[in-house]
Image (cartoon, rainbow, N blue to C red):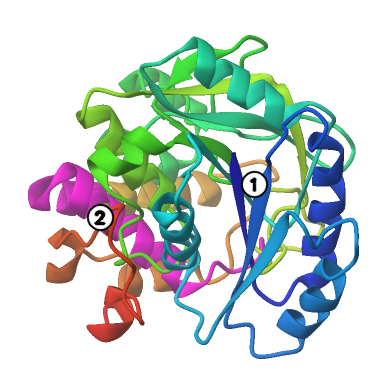
Amino acid sequence: MGIVTVNHRTPGLTAACLASLRQERDRLPGLKAIVVDGGSGDNSAEELAKFIDRPEYRDWVELMPLAINGGFGWANNHAISRLIGQGDPPEYIHLLNPDSEIEPGAVRCLADYLDAHPRVAAVGSQLLELDGSWTGSAFSFPTIRGEFARGAGTGAIDRLLKVPPVAIESAEAREVEWATGASVMIRREALEQVGLFDEGFFLYHEEIELMWRMRRAGWAIATEPRSRVRHVGGGSTGVHSREVVERLRPRRPHYWYRSRARLFGLTRGRLASWAAFCGWIMGHGIWRIRRLLGLTGNAKLLDHEVRDFLKFARPRRDDFASAPVPALRQPSRSPVWMQKRWL
């Protein structure tokens, strides 16, 4: 089995992630890990090289430093391609965020699930906040109705439009539409069929698009709550879903909106992309009216959300041009989004 984690300027978190993985080696003989440094530009690669050179890591962890920060999917593609291209490629590849620490048995649990369910392409873990509480780990695909309701920010609209819950809570393993990319184990056979991550994404939503392709090819996606992973969230970007005490929630980076638009473009098409864009705007207009009437309670605005949404979430022509990498082909020296300046 192969494990891939992508570091970007978080060497301390990555080292803690690797330390939590050591306990899985007894349960999974032959476990190998690749740590990709995504062009951090600081001393991350050097620090990780020293850490991995310790006797307890050097025989099963490999460091893969990349010259540029090409994004989450592009960096993962490099490591996945290396694993698949080797003489005895692993049947399963586990993608694990560097700001995650696994609980005992978490990796073995995912492998057992895939062993028992041959039509499942990917299975995700249950993520935990630092205090041990559950956080979103399995989800429904975004929809036009959902974007309208997200803009409106009220459960009444969700109920009226019968919008399925975005996050799915389940105490039992079950099939879902997509599972978190923070800790997900993927079947190599599925990747060889549908390809790796789309290189048009920089960060966010790329795992949703990949799982959309898998489901369209006849595979299933699942969540396994017995695989528990503590997830800091936002280790590299600062973007997270935890409550804040400030007046405004932290501003999202512009590439979050661009990835959202690209996701709709690749999975729903041109007309639906524009409908989702306009739907959010109309929904947010309703939220503003409710706020003037004092009906939004303690709900907090996202810093610069409307301005950023109008500027970056508007569908563009390149949002409809797919750029997945075939599993048996080495990724390009720079991602498509960078070559064509899509961001």
**Residue 258: percent from left, percent from top:** 35, 66
Categorize mark 1 by other alpha carbons within 10 Å: few (<14), some (14-19), many (20+).
Answer: few
Residue drawn 27% across the image and 78% down it: 342
Q: Is residue 321 visible?
A: yes
Q: Judging from the image, what secondary structure is the residue with disc 1 in?
A: loop
Q: Image check: 134 left or right of 85?
A: right
Furthest toward the front, the residue is 87
Against 306, residue 190 (above or below) is above
Sequence-earlier tag: 2 or 1 = 1
Q: Nearer the viewer, mark 2 or mark 1?
A: 2
Q: Is residue 260 magenta?
A: yes
Residue drawn 75% across the image and 71% down it: 10
Residue drawn 68% across the image and 42% down it: 31
User: What residue sits right under mark 1 in the picture?
Assistant: 299
- Please state the extent of the stretch shown in magenta in the rendering: 248-276
User: What residue sits right under mark 2 in the picture?
Assistant: 326
Locate the C terminus and report the quarter of the image it occupies. Answer: bottom left
Q: Image check: 32 left or right of 117?
A: right
**Residue 295: percent from left, percent from top:** 58, 39
State which quadrant residue 40 falls in: bottom right
Q: Is residue 278 visible?
A: no
Look at label 2 and name its amino acid. Pro
State which quadrant residue 311 falls in: bottom left
Q: Judging from the image, what secondary structure is the residue with disc 2 in?
A: loop
**Residue 292: percent from left, percent from top:** 52, 52
